Image (cartoon, rainbow, N blue to C red):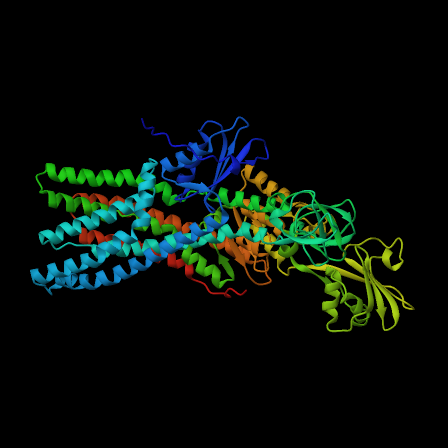
Amino acid sequence: MTSDYTPRQDFSAFLRPNEGGGERLDLLVQGARCAGCISKIEGQVRALAGVDSARMNLTTGKLSVGFADAGGDPALVIETLDRLGYPATLFDPAKSAAAHDAEGRRLAMALGVAAFGAGNAMMFSVPIWAGLFGQELGPAMRTMMQWMSAAVGAPCAIYAGMPFFTSAWRSLKARRANMDVPISIGVLLTLAISFVETVLGGADTYFDAAVSLLFLLLIGRWLDHRLRAKARSAAGDILALQAPVAAVIGGDGQEHRRPIADIVPGDLLLVRPGNRIPVDGRIEAGQSSLDNALLTGETAPVLARVGDTCRAGALNLTGTLRLLATATSEDSAIADIARLVEAGAQSRSRYVQLADKAAALYVPVVHSAAALTFAGGMILGMGPREALLRAVAVLIITCPCALGLAVPAVQVSASARLFRRGVLVKSGAALERLAEIDHVILDKTGVLTEGRPRLVDPVPAAVALAAPLARASAHPLARALALEAGPTIIADKVIETPGQGVEGFIRGRRARLGRAAFVGLTGAGHGETELWLAIEGEPRIRYVFQDKLRADAGATVQALLARGLSVEILSGDGTDPVRHVAEAVGVTAWRAGLTPAEKAQIVAQRTAEGRRVLMVGDGLNDTAALANAHAAMAPGTALDASQNAADLVFSGEGLDAVVTAFDTARTARRRALQNFGFAAAYNLIAAPAAMAGLINPFVAALAMSGSSLAVTLNALRMGAGGGRRWTS
């Protein structure tokens, strides 16, 4: 007696503890392409017994499934996904990247085949078209040309159309209709009727039209793939800020190098000056100044002593530290920011394009009209061939090309215009979101200001006195002082006291550069943006630094307010610097000393209040807020992770690009709505005409192409206007 029982795979070893209790399993899901896919996957998985949560990230392909304490069945989750048409495996970032690269190669190959097929099928179609204008081909020659066009165009169309065919089939299995459904049906029916016409010796064949349509659509699909590749790199750029290895002090007191992924809480780590903190930890010995600018946006270094907590990603400036690791690399502050960015990218993937919404109505209406046309023709006594030609004409003339081009054509034109103005648009959908914003959140350091401290009212003689000590220090203010001085000697016998200052000999005289107390002054204040110099036999000199405001920061804020937008400043910097900048630019709503999570939380709070937020930031502490905002911008000087999390990146020293981008986005929205209106009016007129037999498939193809040309020409009106080009 045999059994059909197949043992299920045991996934218990791959379950990880969840923060809120229970366990979590991360899976790599293949084939998900749109918000409908996400809704279907999350809904079906969440309905399974023992499953608490299901969160799908379209950008990375990762599905995080949370199981209750009572437990669930991971194998059942994978079986459910497979039944839905989305095969899943255990999540591996390397496999995710490989799958994404493989998809890119498939799209590129399909695009190349479509380009080849369109060009070569057209070569055989042109003589047939010429026959319509008095240059008649003989029946044998025309049939040969049709078969040659079929031999080239049909195989290329089938291969190039596979991305659309598979997507349409998956959508229909999920009982939904995306834009790929009418495209697939239109292409397949066009090929079928063309073959029938060729066999019966008819005059209407459209092999070249089918493959040309796929070529144009594949360009958009490949560009979408590239945009998603950019989006997925934001979290990776953040995690790359962690050191790949850490110096661990073993039980024998010796230093050992160990991959950061192998660090566990309780390990004793050694962090030298110039290195980044590998994982979150508590200082057991030593003290130093830490540069937390990437994490918090705080411009002034922070003094860290025994007992203080250090966050992964902070730069150790001055002293050697011994840290007791309190978290793994996956649970560090850097990893938390990366998770916030990933969550923001996931929320963006839920943005439903207007064209996809229209498809839900378009598909049943148009296909029902084509079916009724065929049935009506048969009832009226037409032959099957004539009735089918009339039905195909309905499908061709109502092909959603104009609808599909309505937004992308405008986005391309608007993006080109912004590029000439120094703004790089990374996502076409970002322009739609940018046009909808009503609240702007600005970071201070690097956005409203230039992001680098500069000496206020420098006196050359005083700068020259301090330069030898400044060149010997890694402190940001000392580096700014050395930059102001230019090339000079370095002090002798230099000793740097973490968090206080640097001491040495300048031409034989003892000198100190640092805090007021370090040079022997009491009651002189503790300014974080000042340095004092004390040289034997000389009066003490004070150096004041300031992060200079962008020249057009105030004008930009006023321009945003004039457009009816509310403006708010969120910064990780100290209270006094933020207050000073807010007063200078005329912003009354501001908050200082914020962590990355707090910034993202405020963005989420504004969103919950019904606001549509534009976040403009440049630091690592801004990436989570950028990813969760309705739209996001970053300057070209921003951290790579911030640029990847943003939708638009602007170059140059000016902030006016924010206003330019907003105005352009508003104009683009008007053009897109005009295109939608034209596409709707066109279909309302063209479909009844085709159903009545007033339009044959050839004229239908011309009309369909004309409608696409019309929306494209309207979109090109966005390209007017010059200006400066993008500069990095």
Q: Quadrant of residue 496?
A: bottom right
Residue at (16, 43) in percent of width and height: 692
Residue extending furthest front?
Answer: 1
Q: x, y (%) of residue 174?
A: 35, 36
Q: Quadrant of the C terminus?
A: bottom right
Q: x, y (%) of residue 157?
A: 26, 54
Q: Quadrant of residue 340?
A: top right
* Rendered position, 178 above or below 535: above
Identify which residue, 205 or 687, lies in the foreground.
Answer: 205
Q: Quadrant of the N terminus?
A: top left
Residue at (37, 29) in percent of width and height: 5
Residue extending furthest right?
Answer: 537
Q: How many marks?
A: 0
Looking at the image, can residue 397 be seen? no
* Rendered position, 331 above or below 655: above
* Rendered position, 67 above or below 382: above
Q: x, y (%) of residue 10?
A: 47, 34
Looking at the image, can residue 160 be seen? yes
Q: x, y (%) of residue 184?
A: 28, 46
Is 601 left or right of 154, judged from the image as shown?
Answer: right
Identify which residue, 92 or 422, lies in the foreground.
Answer: 92
Identify which residue, 574 or 245, lies in the foreground.
Answer: 245
Is 398 left or right of 238, judged from the image as shown?
Answer: left
